[in-house]
Image (tube, rainbow, N blue to C red):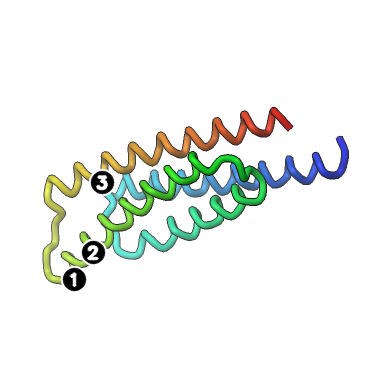
Amino acid sequence: MDTATHARTAVVAELLSALDAYAQWLSALRERSGFAAGSLSTGQDELQKVLELRRTSCPLLTREATELLVVHTQLANLLYECQLRTVRGCTTANAGELSQCADLVQRQVAAIELLRRAVARESSEH
């Protein structure tokens, strides 16, 4: 294996590791019903690392990365709205919010899997 191939393999492994960390955050979010204060910043940090590594190692996977970012943004907006309601004194999330959060988490799990498959496919082509 030449140096360039070895370096690319290492970056792809780092990308997959960052994607795993993001998936773990998403899993923890699901277990807490998505409305724990302060949980959003960790997910954003993990997602940022995924996107940066994707940009350098797999620049052609724009569609897959965009789906990940779109769903994360929707999830972030929902979490922000729920946290605002908590600040205003509401102590429980309504059924619609819980259902919307669960739907977004499922979409994000699918987006993560789509990106994993695309990274594996692109890596095998190089």
Q: CA distance from mark 1 to mark 2?
A: 6 Å
Image location of residue 81, percent across then percent down? 22, 61
| Residue 77 located left or right of residue 56 | left
Q: Quadrant of the N terminus?
A: top right
Q: Is residue 73 above or below residue 65?
A: below
Q: Which label belongs to residue 101?
A: 3
Instruction: Choose between 31 and 12: the one closer to the eye.
Output: 12
Provide the residue designation for mark 1: 87
Disc nearest the viewer among 1 and 3: 3
Give coordinates of residue 8: x percent, y percent: 74, 43
Amino acid carrying label 1: it is: Val
Q: Return the mark for residue 107.
A: none
In the picture, the disc for residue 83 is: 2
Q: Residue 112: x, y in percent?
A: 46, 39
Residue 111 horizontal side relative to residue 35, left or right: right
Residue at 13%, 71% (x, y): give it: 88
Tag 1, which secondary structure?
Answer: helix
Vertical placement of residue 117 versus 69, above or below: above
Please tell me which of labels 3 and 2 falls first in the chain.
2
